[in-house]
Each structure stands twice: as C-alpha cells, then as structure tokens.
Amino acid sequence: MPVRTASAANCLSKEKTAGTYAFKVKLSGGALFIGKQARWVVDYVDGKNFTEYEIDEKNIKYTVTRNGKKQQTMSSPHQLTGADGFYDLTVSVGTTSKMVVVSSGKGGKSLISSPIEDAASGSFGFEKDVTVTDFSFTPAK
C-alpha cells in the first residue's frame, strides 16, 4: 500500500474534469485545542476560488471560497471509524448536477454534498502535509 504525503501548499491533480476520486486519508495534527484532521480542495481555480473539505474524528465540513471571500460553510457529523488512523473516502465531482458528493469508501453512504462552479475549470488536491494512500481517479462517462 503506497503512502504519499503532500508537501506542497496544495498538491493538485492534473485532471480538471468530473469524475470520482477514491483515497484513504490519515488524520494528523492534534494540537492542544485542535484535534486531528485532514483537508483537501475541490474546484480549485486559484487561491481565491475553491472549496475546502475537512474531516476530523467526528465531523466532515466544507467551506466554499469565491473571490477570496468565504461564501458557504456546512458541517455534518459522520460515524466513520478510521483504520490505523486512515479514513476511506470517495469524492464524486458531477458534471450535470454541479455537485461534489463525499461518501464513505466505494459505494458507501453519502456524508456531505457541496455546490461546484464548473468541473472542467477547477482541480482536486490535498492540503500540505496530508498523508494519502490507495488514491485513484476515474473520469465521468
């Protein structure tokens, strides 16, 4: 099981298309008042236009940023259990629905959905120092 750790500010996929990203991500951190978490971005156009997702041991949330301003934030509790600190996730980026759906593993329960501007203009990527394994991308048909 190859493990990768993102070390750039945002390690972005070359793909700018709708499809399904499947991966296992490890929660890290855990400072005094901040628990362990992992973050990734969807629909990343530039540093002012993107949707950031964050998962911790209890919740998953997203924040939409447009023109440098936070537009929308939603949080939802999840009941996932990490295996050795890794959470098995699937991120589906739609074309016609203009939605991103995060679910637990392949074919798993939907956890949270967010709007997307244009699947063909933004990238998917991981935030700095995120450990990922079993990453795959399947383009939408």
Image (cartoon, rainbow, N blue to C red):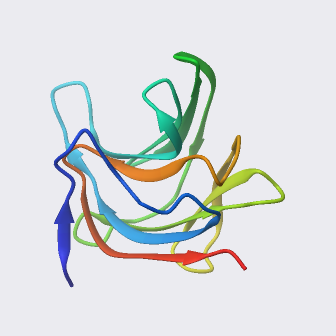
The N terminus appears in which quarter of the rendering?
bottom left
The C terminus appears in which quarter of the rendering?
bottom right
How many numbered marks are there? 0
- 63, above or below 108, in the image: above
Q: Position of residue 112 (x, y in %)?
A: 64, 51
In this rendered view, identify the residue nearer to me: 53 or 31.
Answer: 53
- Left or right of 121, for residue 25: left
- Left or right of 108, for residue 80: left
- 96, above or below 35, in the image: below
Q: Position of residue 49 (x, y in %)?
A: 54, 29
- 54, above or below 12, in the image: above
Residue at the spot 40% in from the left edge and 52% down from the top edge: 125
Q: Quadrant of residue 23?
A: bottom left
Q: Farthest residue to the bottom: give it.
A: 1
Q: Farthest residue to the top: give it.
A: 69
Residue at the spot 66% in from the left edge and 57% down from the top edge: 101
Q: Position of residue 20 (x, y in %)?
A: 58, 71
- 106, above or below 29, in the image: below
Q: Position of residue 53 (x, y in %)?
A: 48, 43
Residue at the spot 24% in from the left edge and 52% down from the top edge: 130
- Left or right of 119, for residue 41: left
In this rendered view, identify the residue nearer to me: 46 or 36.
Answer: 46
